Image (cartoon, helix red, strand yellow):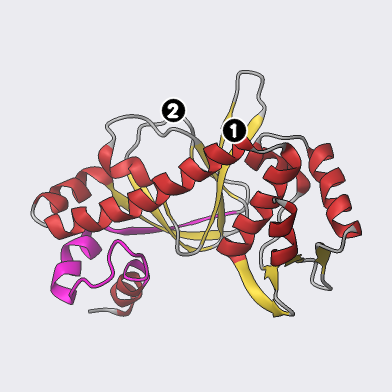
């Protein structure tokens, strides 16, 4: 196996979908996988484009978003290294349901859906793993919908911060978590369908209450327990 193939295999096997597969089982996947680098600001696909590929992020950050008829942006997700998208791609004969844009220089791997479907026919164990990954995403979407219905904007912003801490956070001591990725107030607002002004005002409130702070590197530091107490 050459160096490039080996690095591709190591990357793919870091995803839950391919963990546990033998070298022999990985061979047909490596044959159809392709690499591509996207510059910050470039689109990977646009909403409505034919759904042809599923992508795996090696490095960088990708924004998944939709726009309404007035051009207002609604961020569906912010993805980073170790994420795949779109998860439903292997099961849809449709168009991409949203836009995807690299928000920093990103290295992606992608697998053509038609080629992968042919592979799945002879490898049912991968289908089972894929169902489990999709199940986790469904639970996450259900939780977000519940947040939208049952909680006010102040509470939704706190829940968003806690979710970002779970996905991007590292322990910072004193039971605090630092979010090791930076998000603008506009991006935070678009994630929950709010306004930048509302997010800015809420973050100011949370800082005054000493529930969050910004460290020297510009990353947000959360007092998780105290934020959770704000919800009850």
Image vertical order of residue 14 relative to residue 113, above or below: below
Q: Is disc 1 surrounded by few (<14), some (14 to 19) or many (20+) residues within 10 Å?
A: few
Task: Name, please, the residue furthest toward the front.
Answer: 232
Q: Residue 36, image x and y in percent?
A: 43, 57
Q: Nearer the viewer, residue 213 or 67?
A: 213
Image height of 59 relative to 190, above or below? below
- 2 or 1: tag closer to the N-terminus: 2
Give residue 12's quadrant in the image: bottom left
Q: Residue 206, image x and y in percent?
A: 84, 55
Q: Which residues fall within the magenta stretch?
A: 11-39
**From the viewer's perspective, is residue 133 above or below residue 149?**
below
Regarding residue 188, the answer to whether it shows in the image is no
Q: Residue at x 61, y 18 (%)?
A: 69
Q: Residue at x 86, y 64 (%)?
A: 210
Residue 151 within the segment the image draws in magenta = no
Mark 2 crowdedness (10 Å alpha carbons): few <14, some 14-19, many ≥20: few
Quadrant in which residue 123 is drawn: bottom left
Count of all numbered marks drawn on residues in the image = 2
Residue beneath label 2, please? 48
Residue 204 position in % (x across, y down):
88, 52
Q: Residue at x 21, y 50 (%)?
A: 116
Q: Secondary structure at mark 1?
A: helix
Residue in front for this viewpoint, 219 or 37: 219
User: Which residue bears the numbered disc 1?
Assistant: 149
Residue 14 belongs to the span the image colors magenta: yes
Q: Please state the horizontal and vertical placement of residue 44, each as a whole percent of the image.
A: 48, 45
At mark 2, the secondary structure is loop
Q: Mark 2 against mark 1, which lies toward the viewer?
A: 1
Considering every residue shown, the one lying at the far right of the view is 208
């Amino acid at each position: 196996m050459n160096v490039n193939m080996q690095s591709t295999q190591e990357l793919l096997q870091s995803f839950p979908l391919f963990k546990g597969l033998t070298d022999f089982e990985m061979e047909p996947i490596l044959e159809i996988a392709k690499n591509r680098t996207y510059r910050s600001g470039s689109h990977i696909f646009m909403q409505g484009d034919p759904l042809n590929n599923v992508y795996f992020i090696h490095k960088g950050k990708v924004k998944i978003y939709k726009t309404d008829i007035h051009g207002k942006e609604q961020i569906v997700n912010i993805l980073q290294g170790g994420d795949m998208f779109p998860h439903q791609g292997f099961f849809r004969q449709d168009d991409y349901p949203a836009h995807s844009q690299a928000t920093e220089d990103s290295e992606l791997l992608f697998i053509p859906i038609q080629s992968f479907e042919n592979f799945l026919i002879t490898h049912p164990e991968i289908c089972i793993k894929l169902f489990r990954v999709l199940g986790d995403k469904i639970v996450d979407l259900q939780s977000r919908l519940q947040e939208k219905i049952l909680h006010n904007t102040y509470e939704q912003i706190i829940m968003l911060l806690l979710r970002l801490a779970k996905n991007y956070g590292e322990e910072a001591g004193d039971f605090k978590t630092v979010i090791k990725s930076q998000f603008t107030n506009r991006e935070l607002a678009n994630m929950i369908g709010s306004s930048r002004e509302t997010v800015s005002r809420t973050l100011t409130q949370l800082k005054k209450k000493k529930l969050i702070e910004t460290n020297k590197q510009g990353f947000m530091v959360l007092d998780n327990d105290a934020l959770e107490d704000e919800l009850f």
